[in-house]
Image (cartoon, rainbow, N blue to C red):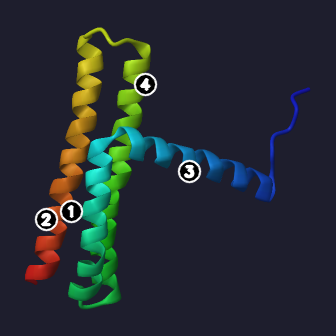
């Protein structure tokens, strides 16, 4: 019989530890993530100041926060691809390009959201 895993608060604390390690690794190894964190920290007070309602503020903050989330997925895809092989392979290149495209789409979406909210 399999040994049961951690449950309750112990599981949450363990998962939080791994999440923190992931954020630290991303901060240390990914320049794009550091730049996007700076973008988020600059955008945050502007979103609070420029949003006319709680909903607008939330949408502005959420749109830039999504860039960080998508960048995290992109970095994880790149790490796995690089772990498998540093040799060029069409599928590896395609996976990395698609991750990069996802980040670009998140940035475009954030810009569109900010434009729509601020120009309305």
**Which of the labelled discs sits on residue 37, or is there none?**
none
Cβ atoms under marks 1 and 3 closer than 8 Å: no
Residue bearing the label numbered 3: 20
Give me the C-alpha separation between circle 2 and circle 4: 31 Å
Where is residue 3? Give x, y as percent: 88, 32
Residue bearing the label numbered 2: 112
Outermost residue, front direction? 28
Question: What kind of element bears circle 3?
Answer: helix
Which residue is at 23% across, 80% downward?
46
Cβ atoms under marks 2 and 4 closer than 8 Å: no
Residue bearing the label numbered 1: 110
Give me the C-alpha separation between circle 2 and circle 3: 31 Å
Q: Mark 2 or 3, which is nearer the eye?
A: 3
Q: Earlier in the sequence, mark 3 or mark 4?
A: 3
Outermost residue, left direction? 119
**Which of the labelled discs sits on residue 80, or is there none?**
4
Q: Residues within 10 Å of mark 4 (few under 14, many from 20)?
A: few
From what the image shows, is residue 57 above or below residue 33?
A: below
Q: Mark 2 or 4, which is nearer the eye?
A: 4
Where is residue 96? Give x, y as percent: 27, 28
Q: Mark 3 or 4, which is nearer the eye?
A: 3
Give me the C-alpha separation between circle 3 and circle 4: 19 Å
Q: Quadrant of residue 118?
A: bottom left
Give me the C-alpha separation between circle 4 and circle 1: 27 Å
Cβ atoms under marks 2 and 1 closer than 8 Å: yes
Question: What kind of element bears circle 1?
Answer: helix
- Can you say which quadrant of the picture contains the C terminus? bottom left
Which residue is at 23% across, 53% downward?
106
């Amino acid at each position: 019989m399999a040994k049961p895993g951690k449950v309750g608060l112990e599981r949450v604390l363990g998962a939080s530890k791994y999440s923190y390690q992931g954020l630290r690794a991303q901060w240390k190894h990914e320049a794009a993530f550091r730049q996007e964190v700076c973008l988020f920290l600059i955008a945050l007070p502007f979103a609070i100041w420029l949003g006319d309602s709680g909903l607008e503020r939330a949408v502005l903050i959420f749109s830039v926060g999504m860039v960080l989330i998508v960048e995290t997925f992109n970095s994880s895809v790149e790490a796995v691809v690089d772990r498998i092989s540093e040799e060029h392979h069409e599928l590896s290149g395609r996976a990395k390009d698609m991750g990069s495209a996802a980040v670009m789409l998140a940035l475009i979406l954030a810009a569109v959201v900010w434009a729509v909210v601020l120009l309305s």
